[in-house]
Amino acid sequence: MDTEAPGFDPLSYTQVDDLSVTECFEKLKLVSNKSTYKDVAIWLGKTQMDYNNWRRSGKLPWFEIIRALLREGISLDWFFAPGQDLSKPQYVYSAADYTKASVREHEQWQRFNFLNAHRRVRPLLEKYQLESSRKAEAFLLECYLLSKDNFLNKEQAVELIARALAMDPPKTEELR
């Protein structure tokens, strides 16, 4: 059933709302270097039956098409509106706004990491009866946050440090 539409020029412009399944798949054959509609459907991650359903219903699989085009680095403007002079939106954000947003994201990430580290360290402080030592807690948190997964598992490193601190308990004046 892979027949081409007679007299169809795949590079001509068709309004997206008027784009038929056949026209769209002809364009997709060009960009995907596939020779049949079935192969294009497979390139989109679907089957021949999916293509048949799309053709019968006249509905295009927009999500799959856009994802495949972007995956291949193909301009959506070029595919959906060749030869059209499309404008790009002007952003109202300044570089300072972008920097502020980046700083906020970084601060959120740091807070999340700290809370995660605290959640991991707290049971060790209790296990080795170091809950009252702010110094031990700060030390374990610092070790947890500075450890690198590539060299030593964080839980193992913190466990070893907690054991070491438990062997030589902090003096009474260090607890405050």
Image (tube, grey):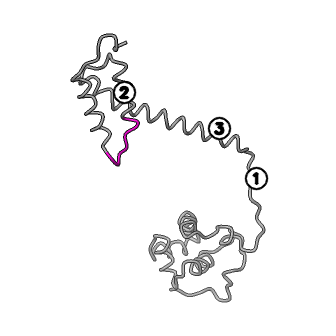
Q: Nearer the viewer, mark 1 or mark 2?
A: 2
Res 162 quadrant in image: top left
Secondary structure under badge 3? Answer: helix
Separation of marks 3 and 1 at Cα, in angstroms: 19 Å
Q: Earlier in the sequence, mark 1 or mark 2?
A: 1
Indicate whether 96 appears above or below 28.
Answer: above
Q: Which residue is mark 2?
A: 139
Q: Which residue is mark 3?
A: 100
Question: Closer to the observer: label 3 or label 1?
Answer: 3
Which residue is tagged 1? 90
Residue in the picture at 29% in, 17% down: 170
Q: Are marks 3 and 1 in contact (CB under 8 Å)?
A: no
Q: Nearer the viewer, residue 78 or 150?
A: 150
Residue flagged by tag 3: what amino acid is it?
Lys
Badge 2 local density, few (<14 within 10 Å), some, or many (20+)?
some
Classified by dominant secondary structure, the portion drawn in magenta counts as loop
Q: Which residues are magenta?
A: 144-151
Residue name at image x 25 percent, y 33 percent: 160
Quarter of the image where the C terminus is located: top left
